[in-house]
Amino acid sequence: MKKGYYRIIFLIGIIIIFSGCVKKDQKNNVIIINNKEINIEIADSWPERVQGLSGRDNLCNDCGLMFIFDNKDEYSFWMKGMKFSIDIIWIDDNKIVYIVENASLPRGDNIPSYIPVVPANKVLEVNAGFVKKNNIKLGDIVKF
């Protein structure tokens, strides 16, 4: 009886672990800018947007975090809790409309924030230097 009980508990644990993985994979996608594939996580809920990349130690080389908004606006991004520099790319539908390269890290109480001069409905955060390395510029098309 005990052996069967432990087997059931083990199977339930495996199901829980894999159900968590499936949910996470559904939020991972690939976009293409200038023939460069970027594996993105999507932040489309308020808690995910607030957290962003804050507190993370790094981001893989060809990865990014995509913020998706319901409406177009001049969304501001700050560097609170950031441990590494990033490039920030604002996207209006599928066109790059504003870029900040090498966004500065916080220093003490000085937390940099960045505001675009045009509205957008998506924002992509990638590692600092990604924009330059991949020749990304205003007007480039993002393929989803």
Image (cartoon, rainbow, N blue to C red):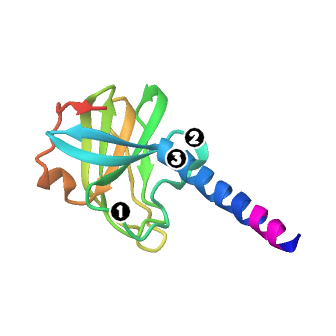
Q: Specify the amino acid type for callout 1.
A: Leu
- Tags 2 and 3 in contact by the CB under 8 Å rule? yes
User: In the image, is 86 to the left or to the right of 21?
Assistant: left
Q: Which residue is mark 1?
A: 59
- Amino acid marked by disc 3: Arg
Q: Is residue 24 magenta?
A: no
23 left or right of 94 in image? right
Q: Residues within 10 Å of mark 1 (few under 14, many from 20)?
A: some
Q: Quadrant of the C terminus?
A: top left
Q: Position of residue 117 (x, y in %)?
A: 31, 35
Q: Which residues are magenta?
A: 3-8
Residue at 41% x, 72% y is 107
Confirm whether residue 93 shows in the render: yes
Q: How far apart, in angstroms, are the residues tagged by discs 2 and 3?
A: 6 Å
Report how far apart the C-alphas of labels 1 and 2 lie in the structure: 20 Å
Q: Nearer the viewer, residue 141 or 92?
A: 141
User: For mark 2, what is the residue?
Assistant: 45
The residues bearing labels 3 and 1 have C-alpha atoms spaced at a distance of 16 Å
Q: Say which residue appears at 81% left-offset and 72% top-offset.
A: 3
- Where disc 3 sits, the SS reads helix
Q: Position of residue 138 (x, y in %)?
A: 17, 35
Q: Which mark is residue 49?
A: 3
At 34% from the left and 44% from the top, the residue drawn is: 124
SS category of the residue bearing label 2: loop
Q: Position of residue 69 (x, y in %)?
A: 48, 32
Which one is in front, 20 or 116?
20
Which secondary structure class fits the magenta region best? helix
Q: Earlier in the sequence, mark 3 or mark 1?
A: 3
